[in-house]
Image (spheres, rainbow, N blue to C red):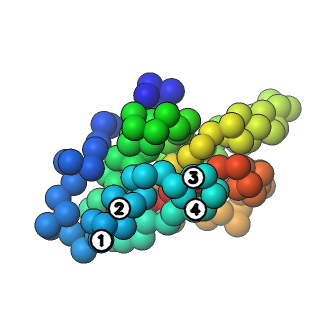
Amino acid sequence: MHAAKFPVHRDLAGFEFEQSKVDRSLIDDLASMSFTEQAHNVVLIGGTGTGKTHLATALGIAGITQHGKRVRFYSTVDLVNLLEQEKAAGKAGKLAFALMRMDMIILDELGIYPLASLEVPCYSICYPSSTSIRA
């Protein structure tokens, strides 16, 4: 669990589905982690404070605790910074290779970073064997 680097512990039991427009049956289905077996992506879209990060974290925790999945959580800005530092150190590709071993990669706050400026195509490298939940 520690290796996933979740910012806080969140679970599905703590999510207030009654206060949200989120389809609970869809989230329960995602919690089965079957989408990871097919390397499908899940994108959580919504405004500020709608529970995207909570749900992404809860699904990641369920993946680890209930299904033995390898999960890693990143703030997109932090991941981009790590990739840029790696590139500057002449070690480009090392992190992307490590991410390929993950079953699920959670990219939080994806919408606030201009991905067109990202020179390291980590997502395309990791896509065939990983599942990303964008929150």
Q: Residue furthest bottom?
A: 21
- Residue bearing mark 2: 27
Q: In the image, residue 73 lies at what x, y percent? A: 50, 42
Going by the numbered disc 2, the residue's amino acid type is Ile
Q: Do the residues labelled 3 and 4 touch (CB within 8 Å)?
A: no
Alpha carbon separation for disc pair 1 and 4: 17 Å
Residue occupying image coordinates x 21% and y 48%: 13
Estimate the spatial distance between the alpha carbons at disc 2 and disc 3, rounded to whole Å.
14 Å
In the image, 61: left or right of 84?
A: left
Precedes in sequence: disc 2 or disc 3 = 2
Question: Mark 4 = which residue?
Answer: 41
Q: Is mark 2 on a helix, strand or loop?
A: helix
**On the rendered structure, is 84 left or right of 4?**
right
Which residue is rendered at x = 24% and y = 74% of the image? 21
In the depicted view, which residue is nearer to us: 47 or 27?
A: 27
Q: Position of residue 79 (x, y in %)?
A: 60, 44
Q: Which residue of the protein is positioned furthest toward the top in this rendering?
A: 2
Please indicate whether residue 27 sits to the left or right of residue 34 in the image.
Answer: left
Residue position for label 1: 23
Three-letter code, disc 1: Asp
Q: Nearer the viewer, residue 61 or 6?
A: 61
Q: Is residue 45 above or below residue 95?
A: below
Q: What residue is shown with label 3?
A: 36
Residue furthest to the left in view is 18
**Label 3 – label 4 distance at C-alpha:** 8 Å
